[in-house]
Amino acid sequence: MKSKIALAFEKCKKEKRPALITYTVAGDDTKNNSLNILNTISKHADILELGFPHNTPIADGGQIQGSSHRALKNGITLKDVFQIVKKFKKNNSSKPLILMGYFNLIYQSGENNFLKNCKVAGVDGLIIVDLPYPENKFFANKCRKKSINFIQLLSPTTSKERMKKIIKDSHDMIYYISMLSTTGGKLKVSPKKILENYNKIKRINPKKNLVIGFGITDKTIASLKSANGLVVGSMLCKTIANSIKMRQNPVTKLDKVVYNLKKKII
């Protein structure tokens, strides 16, 4: 049986466009609004990434750190994150949702307990930023047994030999970090160069769904639309921050932003 993630990519390929993958942080700016945001942007996004907040998000830039800080200030817990996912999935069962975060919280919760909660809530995939290959193989296999996708990460410095092993062991989606930076940084390399690197990876196994993340905004997304999928996160977190500052409704603002992003890749 194909996963919801695999089916989402199939649908996008039939429509000859990349999957639009959004990232927001659970509990930003409130628990209720976080759920409202997911419900609203899921009308335009093909796959949703939801960050579980961490007090030291080492891979995240200022915007996502700000989102995590707001969520933690609101008292968000891992239990709350699973509740948000469960409520979202109740009305959006076919929409793939990926949890993204750091291994420390999984370790504290216990791997088996964490995966059990993922399964009950309806989580489709996991991205664990600080659990690299091959150290993640054991946990990735646990995920596979639960029919949860474990998404492997590749970067511009990953060697070809290592890349081949990661791709061989990957599930239904691989995440290519487009540049050596924290999230939300300005593109330090041209979209043309990113696609050159991307296509080299694709040639290793063209059947694998490879997505690009880091530095993608409304200004760069159209130039990267030959990829299987594009992840936009920091721009959405910035929209939430600006909405709070201007005392506007972040749900309405994000609806427009994600709708416009989708238009650029169709």
Image (cartoon, grey):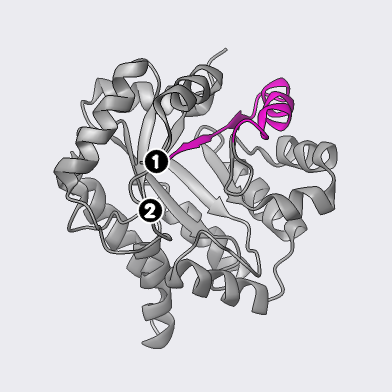
Residue 136 coordinates in the image, percent (x, y): 66, 34
**Residue nearer the viewer, 97 or 110:** 110
* Image-based side of 2 in relation to 111, left or right: left
Residue 89 coordinates in the image, percent (x, y): 60, 42
Q: CA distance from mark 1 to mark 2?
A: 8 Å
**Residue nearer the viewer, 21 or 138:** 138
Query: What residue did someone put label 2 on?
Result: 180
- Residue 227 in sight here: no
- Say which element carries label 1: loop
Residue at (54%, 67%) from the top-left corner? 33
Q: Which residues are magenta?
A: 133-154
Query: What residue did someone put label 1 on?
Result: 157
Check disc 1 and give the amino acid type: Thr
Q: Quadrant of residue 237?
A: bottom left
- Look at the image and say whether residue 144 sits in the magenta stretch: yes
- Please give the label number shown on residue 46: none
- Say which element carries label 2: loop
Image mark count: 2
* Image-based side of 208 in relation to 79, left or right: left
Q: Residues within 10 Å of mark 2 (few under 14, many from 20)?
A: some
Q: Which image quadrant: the N terminus?
A: top right
Marks 1 & 2, CB-CB < 8 Å contact: yes
